[in-house]
Amino acid sequence: MAWPEIHQVVVMSLVLSQLPVCCGSPDPRHRESLMSDEASRQTGGNLLLTEAELKLSAQLHKLKEQEMASLDFPPAMHFFKAKPLIQRSPIYRLLQRMPKGAALHIHDFSMVGVEWLVWNVTYRPHCYLCFTEDQSVRFCFSPLQPKPVPQCSSWVLLKTWRAKIGNTTDFDNSLIRNLTLFTEDPEDAYPNQDAVWKRFEQAFVSAWGLVTYAPVFKDYYYEGLSQLYLDNCMYLELRALLPETYELDGSTHDKAWGLKAYQDVTRQFVSEHPDFLGARVIFTVHRGLNASMAMEAVEEAMFLQKSFPEIMAGFDLVGREDEGRPLWYFREALSLPSERGVNLPFFFHAGETDEDGTEVDGNMLDALLFNTSRIGHGFALLRHPVVKELSRKRGIAVEVCPISNQVLKLVADLRNHPASVLMSEGHPLVISSDDPAMFGASGLSYDFYEAFTGIGGLSSNIGTLKELAMNSIRYSSLSPERQKEALVMWQRKWDKFISENSR
Ligand SMILES: *[C@@H]1O[C@H](CO)[C@@H](O)[C@H](O)[C@H]1NC(C)=O
Ligand SMILES: *[C@@H]1O[C@H](CO)[C@@H](O)[C@H](O)[C@H]1NC(C)=O
Ligand SMILES: *[C@@H]1O[C@H](CO)[C@@H](O)[C@H](O)[C@H]1NC(C)=O
Ligand SMILES: *[C@@H]1O[C@H](CO)[C@@H](O)[C@H](O)[C@H]1NC(C)=O
Ligand SMILES: *[C@@H]1O[C@H](CO)[C@@H](O)[C@H](O)[C@H]1NC(C)=O
Ligand SMILES: [Zn+2]
């Protein structure tokens, strides 16, 4: 008999020996012990909780039972429809106040609610607008009438345009709609992934001229940190393209300027908010690049890492995985750092796909082979048991972004999100929001709500939330000393939160 079969027999007999020997009803103590074994395996299942934490957990459990019994259980609905319900949820309001630790997966141009872009930035002097042929808009700051560019034959000064319209409410709302994916009927507007990604990329291009204007670039980032701070997050790792930014006189700045700007603004923000720990930047390039451009990008990343070790955390590739090149295509570029003995940590997006077995579906394995520090999304992880095991053994956390996965059409009902399995077995994971502004979300609280009520179901409890928050520090790029400091700061906030909210 081959070994695996013997093994199977042994395992079977072990399981059988634990089952009650005789007839009749199963032994309730045995049932109890199996159930508690299972509960101990979930995220936070092994934490020892205080009396006050257990009390708050019981309150949350009761609230969750009520919300789950409702016909309109928010995680089962599209976020665009669920959002007003979530805002009324007492669980959500509690999660807003909860110290959530770090946001480890957020992109540079989707940090700040777009209302701020429209109501603040487009009202600044010298802001021009152009309507494109495909019903979209572009912006640009300029002292004089800008020249026509492809897609944009004529620019109008927003100040003049608004004066002509008089009542600008509807117009400003249309700009807001241009900059997000929000729509009343998402199922109809976005019948498939192609449609939703097309709009996603269009909204991104529309925001480009606003956020790459150098003065706005800094204000936008400051505003983004403020919004995270208000949502009770204390640290950020920002995926950033470091695009060329421009001044009113047409002069431009390079990537080093952008990184320095992030560093300066972070320092300023921390000095004004001493209970905010700071931020680091993961430099990202588009995965549509060819091999030689990728080599250049990695060279540049190594240079930036060396020049700005405080703010620079590492490197990643972004853009729709299904459309871009697989990580394996970039293997030569991605091997450069280790060949040169340079430390350039990777934080790869991988497994944001439902196309099982494709080349792109191999990205998670390749991410691990290239020694990634975390896996962005890992939506396809369950289909790869070996990768899953490696990620668990090596403590490579999965960055779960529930609302993003739903809006971008990988899963409709968040109770069926694959992370529910990962959570039930205590796989290393953190919760993040990816592109909150594009989805009409903000900070981390909406995604925590979806993870806690939808993905975690009734099994997730205060221990789950506590572990998720601590994970966000544990799996950050911070040095061990900084992590210790962060955990102490977080624990103080947590204890205060518990004592103020448990009754
Ligand atoms: C826009 O935001 C900046 C700070 O980022 C602030 O100083 C300014 O007052 C705001 N302007 C308007 C019109 O809200
Ligand atoms: C401007 O238009 C909006 C929407 O059409 C309307 O609700 C609002 O009352 C108008 N404001 C003024 C001052 O007329
Ligand atoms: C973008 O704004 C323009 C101008 O107001 C409007 O005509 C268009 O419908 C908007 N597009 C979207 C997708 O909302
Ligand atoms: C790679 O892309 C760059 C920029 O698009 C282009 O100039 C270059 O020719 C490409 N290289 C190859 C080998 O295709
Ligand atoms: C893997 O990455 C970690 C953290 O970035 C680094 O310390 C380690 O040396 C790397 N190992 C290899 C084999 O490249
Ligand atoms: Zn992302």
Image: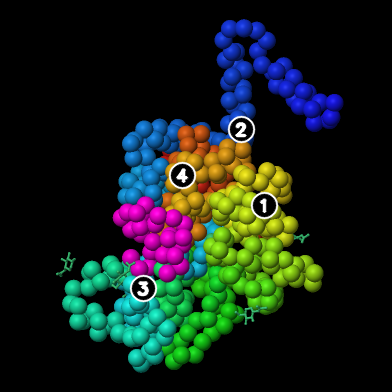
Q: Amino acid at mark 2?
A: Ser
Q: Is residue 30 visible?
A: yes
**N-term mark: 2 or 1:** 2
Q: Which image quadrant: the N terminus? A: top right
- Left or right position of 304 against 93: right
State yes or no: Cβ of the residue under disc 2 lies below 8 Å from any atom of ligand 5.
Answer: no
* Magenta stretch, residue numbers: 177-202
Q: CA distance from mark 2 to mark 1?
A: 21 Å
Q: Amino acid at mark 3?
A: Asp
Q: What is the image's colouring?
A: rainbow
Question: In this rendering, which labeled residue sits more in front, label 4 or label 3?
Answer: 3
Look at mark 4 in the image and give the residue it sits on.
414
Q: CA distance from mark 4 to mark 3?
A: 33 Å
Q: Main secondary structure of the magenta part?
A: helix
Q: Secondary structure at mark 3?
A: loop
Look at mark 1 in the image and give the residue it sits on.
396
